[in-house]
Image (spheres, helix red, strand yellow):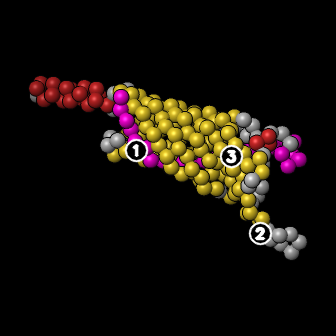
Amino acid sequence: MKKFMLIAALMVVSLSASAQGLFLKPMAGGTVTTMTGDVEDDLKMKVGFTAGAELGYHFNNFFALTAGALYTQQGGKVSREGTENANGEKYNRSLDYLNVPILANVYIIPGLALKAGAQFGFLMRAKKEDEDVKDLFNNTDFSIPVGLSYEMEEAVIDLRYNIGLSNIAQKGIANIVDNKIRNSVIMLTIGYKIPF
């Protein structure tokens, strides 16, 4: 029995040691985004793209921390039906951010991690179709990303929902003094872990 316990303890130590360490994870994928709050009633979800990399550290088999930089296309799509008195219109509100997520990863079973943390966003570009509307939006954003990931060897599939907490609207959009608009982002990416 003592030999069995010793072998089991050595295996756990060995597995924990192998799981520890620094890694880089390039990643890319798609987004489905909208904005919530004081927005047009006909604002729909918009499909976009995200790409970047995360740097992480595995403390053991059960816990890792990551910090990243992701260029992410966000925003929403307006689609108004035509009426007797007005023509319908369709256009995109495109907001591109450089997002910096910092996440705790908790592995509930080997390869499957629940994740949550904080994300800081920096507005790089804002357009309504081809019109520059960056001056209508705040330069920074703060959100809470939550999600899960599954690892198959070095490949990682990651699904997140970024819950926007900051008001991204400058005062006075659409002649409303106190607009409160927040980002809402679903993100699916595929990454590849490169250990150091």
Residue under label 3, please give it: 95
Classify residue 135 as left or right of residue 18.
right
Using the image, determine if residue 164 lies above or below residue 29.
Answer: above
| Amino acid at pointer 1 | Val
- Dot 3 falls on a residue whose secondary structure is strand
Residue under label 1, please give it: 156
Q: Earlier in the sequence, mark 3 or mark 1?
A: 3
Q: Residue furthest bottom?
A: 84
Closer to us: 168 or 128: 128
Which quarter of the rendered picture does the C terminus lie within?
top left
Q: Was residue 71 drawn as part of the magenta stretch in this picture?
A: no
Distance from disc 2 to disc 1, alpha carbons, whole Å, reads 41 Å
Residue under label 2, please give it: 81
Q: Earlier in the sequence, mark 2 or mark 1?
A: 2
Mark 1 closeness class: few <14, some 14–19, many ≥20 residues within 10 Å: many
Q: Nearer the viewer, mark 3 or mark 2?
A: 3
Look at the image and give the residue range highlighted in magenta.
Answer: 173-196
Closer to us: 187 or 124: 124
Task: Give the residue displayed 68% in from the left and 46% down from the top.
Answer: 95
Distance from disc 3 to disc 1, alpha carbons, whole Å, reads 26 Å
Q: Nearer the viewer, mark 3 or mark 1?
A: 3
Using the image, determine if residue 104 lies above or below residue 87.
Answer: above
Classify residue 75 as left or right of residue 134.
left
